[in-house]
Structures are given as C-alpha cells and as structure tokens.
Image (spheres, rainbow, N blue to C red):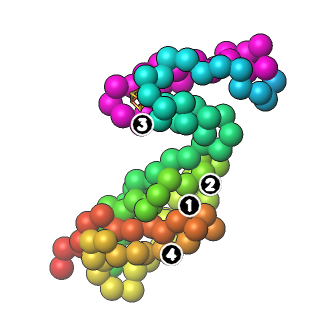
C-alpha cells in the first residue's frame, strides 16, 4: 500500500486529502470534507487538469491577459504555452474573444480576459 497526499485546490478551504493506493487501485480517500475533493484527487491520480492563465503578446506588442475556457490536461501545459507564445493577433484583442479555438489539440479554446488598450 502507498499513501499520496494532496491539498485540494477546488475551494479556499484547502483540505489536506490522503489517498491510499494498492498499485493503481484506489483503496481509500480521506480528509476531504465534500465530494468535490474526492473527485479532485481521483482526477489527480488519473488525468490531472489545470486551467491555464497567462498572457499573449497583443497587437500593440503589450501583454494581454488570457485563460483557457476550461481545464486542460496538465501534461499539455508546455505544448499549450508554446502555442500561446507563438500567437500573434491580426488586430487589437477584445475581452471574451476566442484567440485560439483548439489550444494544443485539447478541444479547449484560449480566450481573452481583458481588452487591449488602443
Ligand atoms: S474537499 Fe471540498 S471543502 Fe475541502 S478544499 Fe476541496 S472542495 Fe473545498
């Protein structure tokens, strides 16, 4: 048996959660105070997901805040950042605009969370 420890990042409570594993099999999950914490740990053990929050180089050359519309696999973060860093808009970026429709082939779009100043 092996124990893995997590701090749940789903809400600010930050519950300390322990998963007991027998090989790949989950024997128990304890320390979570709600079901979302259990789901978080199960996802961490199988396919960890993260929402990417960063900036792109705007039309003016200044940084513009962006994020993925949903969480993407943690394993895709480097590939996603390479696409983000290579992205150059053809006009000033607007709040809520989809900048990359299918970031790193995840099916998740990259959207602007700010408008570019003109
Ligand atoms: S287990 Fe539930 S209450 Fe605890 S941090 Fe996670 S989401 Fe919040």
> What is the x, y in percent for residue 11?
36, 34
The yes-or-no answer for disc 1 within 8 Å of ligand 1 is: no
User: How far, Cα to Cα, is label 1 from label 2?
Assistant: 6 Å
- Closest to the observer, 61 or 50: 50
Q: Where is residue 89 in the image (x, y as percent from the top left)?
A: 40, 80
Q: How far apart are marks 4 and 2 (CA)?
A: 15 Å
Q: State the residue position of label 1.
A: 80
Instruction: Sort mark 4 into few (<14), some (14-19) or many (20+) by Cα contacts within 10 Å.
Output: some
**Residue name at image x 34 percent, y 68 percent:** 112
Dot 1, how many residues are within 10 Å of its Cα: few (below 14), some (14-19), or many (20+)? many
Residue 21, by quadrant, is top right
Circle 4/circle 1 CB separation < 8 Å? no
Q: Name the residue under label 4.
A: 101
Q: Residue 76 carries which label?
A: 2
Mark 3 C-beta to ligand 1 under 8 Å: yes
Residue at numbered disc 3 = 10
Provide residue 23's location: percent of width, then percent of height.
Answer: 81, 24
Q: Upstream in the sequence, badge 3 or badge 1?
A: 3
Query: Around disc 3, counting alpha carbons within 10 Å, would you say few (fewer than 14), some (14 to 19), or many (20 or more)?
Result: few
Q: Distance between the residues labelled 3 and 2?
A: 20 Å
Please provide the residue range marked out in magenta. 1-22
Using the rendered image of the protein, determine whether residue 82 is visible from the camera's viewpoint.
no
Q: Which residue lies furthest to the front in this view?
A: 35
Q: What SS does tag 1 mark?
A: helix
Vertical position of residue 5 compared to residue 41: above or below: above
- In front of the other: label 3 or label 1? 3
Callout 4: helix, strand or loop?
loop
CB within 8 Å, label 1 to label 2: yes
């Amino acid at each position: 048996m092996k124990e893995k420890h997590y701090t749940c990042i789903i809400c600010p409570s930050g519950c300390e959660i322990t998963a007991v594993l027998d090989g790949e099999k989950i024997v128990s999950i304890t320390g979570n105070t709600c079901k979302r914490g259990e789901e978080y740990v199960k996802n961490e053990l199988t396919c960890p997901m993260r929402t990417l929050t960063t900036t792109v180089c705007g039309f003016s050359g200044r940084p513009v805040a962006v994020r993925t519309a949903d969480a993407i696999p943690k394993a895709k973060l480097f590939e996603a950042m390479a696409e983000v860093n290579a992205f150059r808009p053809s006009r000033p970026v607007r709040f809520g605009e989809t900048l990359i429709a299918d970031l790193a082939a995840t099916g998740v779009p990259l959207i602007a969370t700010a408008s570019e100043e003109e």
